[in-house]
Image (spheres, rainbow, N blue to C red):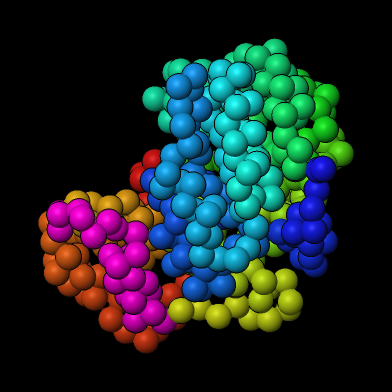
Amino acid sequence: MRGGEAWARLLAQPGPVLALAPMQDVTDWAFWNLVHQYGGADVYYTEFFRVTPDSRLDREILRSITHNPTGRPVIAQLIGNDIPAMVRTAKELQNHPIVAIDLNLGCPAPVVFKKCAGGGLLREPERVHAILGALRDAIEIPFTVKTRIGFDDPQHFDKILEIFARHPIDLLAVHGRTVADRYRPGVRYDLIRTAAEAMSCPVLANGDVTSPAGALEIWKDTATRGLMIGRGAVRNPWLFQQIRQAFAGETPTLPPGREVLRYIESLFDTVTDPDYTELERVHRVKKHLNFLGTGIDAEGLFLHQMRRTTSRAELSRVAADFLDHDQPVALEPVAALEAART
């Protein structure tokens, strides 16, 4: 039976539905646990399960589902192009506590799209049509799709939407860039609105949601049901709660520098495997700080110094130099730093 009480409650709530975007090797179980302590998302997408003819469910990603630390709905995401394997995996996942299964049609990583998976599938619309049809037949719970607006040109996005509309999907998340754009500036919110107007299912807007005021502006301008936030939530785990405050007409609470410093320290304790060497742990935390650093100082000095550290003590010392204070920190990215990071 499609649907479910949790799915219905999710979509019936007031204000924008807030989703944590799937970011491979970043938004894992441990990060869910951490971001939830700051208010968290309304719904969490897993990292993608890579699907091939001989694949099995990734145990670490599956842990996000079976040991969900948030208590909030979980959507399991698939990536691949082998239809029998995709169907098999979708059926297996339905034995676990998820509210929906999502098809990834947006991953811009070359190692993915060169294998005609993720965003690479947008170059083969008929193949997308076949995959959607097979998955819709196999999935008895809500079925969702995350897409970009094209592979290297958004002018055919209307054709992509026509394919989506031929299948009764339950929600569509649209990242307003092409695959070739990766994360360069210039999100096409107008095309996200086009999707919201064209589709009969709810749509989430994805791309450069970086502040509470900006989030509500994007939500209203795109006329979507909600927002999907990835890099913005890694940079600012308070963002979900700040958006809720702004929607309620309250002034969003900005964390003081020392709270941001404690968040960085928490990253060491929650997003790194205890079996890692110290250097491996530092590199893992740096992956997150590459996002956060674009909101610390306009000159990019934090990023420059942080990237050159090789121990926890060094990295903590750099962070303290910039954040050991009680002044509020907005954590909104400096555009030039964000562009350089990508």
Q: Is residue 187 visible?
A: no
Q: Main secondary structure of the magenta part?
A: helix
Q: Can residue 272 be found in the magenta stretch? A: yes
Q: Looking at this view, is 116 or 290 the one in front?
A: 116
**Residue 196 drawn at (x, y percent):** 80, 42
- Residue that appears at 28% across and 65% down: 268
- Residue 256 visible in the snapshot: yes
Q: Please indicate whether residue 146 sits to the left or right of residue 57 in the image.
A: right
At x 67% / y 36%, what residue is drawn? Answer: 145
Q: Where, quadrant-wise, is the N terminus in this rendering?
A: top right
Q: In this picture, is 255 found above or below 319? A: below
Identify the image quadrant of the C terminus. Answer: top left
User: Which of 169 and 154 lies nearest the eye of the viewer?
Assistant: 169
Q: Nearer the viewer, residue 49 or 317?
A: 49
For residue 305, side relative to residue 41 (left or right)? left
Q: Nearer the viewer, residue 215 or 116?
A: 116
Magenta region: 256-279
The residue positioned 69% from the left and 50% from the top of the image is 99
Q: Where does the image place residue 161, in percent across and percent down from the top left?
A: 76, 28
Q: Residue 288: image x %, image y %?
A: 35, 55
Residue at screen point 64% across, 34% down = 91
Where residue 297 appears, as percent x and y from the top left, is: 34, 65
Q: Is residue 202 left or right of residue 28?
A: right
Image mark count: 0
Was residue 275 drawn as part of the magenta stretch in this picture? yes
Q: Quadrant of residue 259?
A: bottom left
Q: Residue furthest bottom?
A: 326
Q: Is residue 149 above or below residue 270?
A: above
Compared with 186, 292 (above or below) is below
